[in-house]
Image: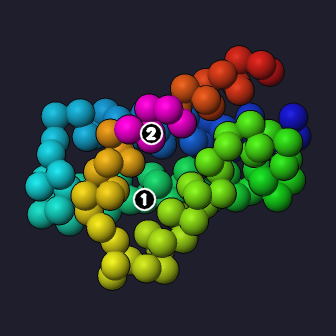
Amino acid sequence: MHPKSPKWLNDILEACDFIQKSTGSRTVADYEHDRLFRSAIERNFEIIGEALNRIQKVDPETAARIPEYSAIISFRNLLIHGYDIVDYSQVWHIVQSDVPNLRAKVVALLKVE
């Protein structure tokens, strides 16, 4: 593993934790109607995507251990560049199903080190 990869993996882990803790008692309607809440969640998705982008550039073997890394980076790009076409229900689905899975993969990668 590249020397910087554990730091970026920890950034991903912290962002996943933030998303999970912040959304635990909230709903998709909260996400849709609360701009501050939405901005906080999307910012953490941006961190996840950027960290994975950095990992894949310097440590492709580690990135490949997260099979959906390319889709995660694309999602980050959509949030930043396609902000006007973001589907709130799709984001909420990712919050509910994909973030816990990503977190588990990152924890496993960090335990290897």
Q: Secondary structure at mark 1?
A: helix
Q: Residue 43 bears which disc, if any?
A: 1
Nearest to viewer (mark 2 / mark 1)? 2
Write down the region rendered in magenta: 97-102
- What residue is drawn where x is 28% and y is 40%? 22
Disc 2: CA contacts within 10 A as few (<14), some (14-19) or many (>=20): many
- What residue is drawn where x is 44% and y is 39%? 99
Query: What is the count of numbered marks?
Result: 2
> x and y percent of residue 35 in the render?
20, 65
Decide which of tag 2 and tag 1 comes sooner along the chain.
1
> What is the quadrant of the C terminus in the image?
top right
Q: Residue 99 bears which disc, if any?
A: 2
**13 in the magenta segment:** no
Mark 2 belongs to which amino acid? Val
- Side (left or right) of 108 relative to 1: left
Depth check: give the residue in front, 25 or 28: 28
Question: Does residue 3 appear in this view?
Answer: no
> x and y percent of residue 92 in the render?
29, 51
Q: Secondary structure at mark 2?
A: helix
> What is the quadrant of the N terminus in the image?
top right
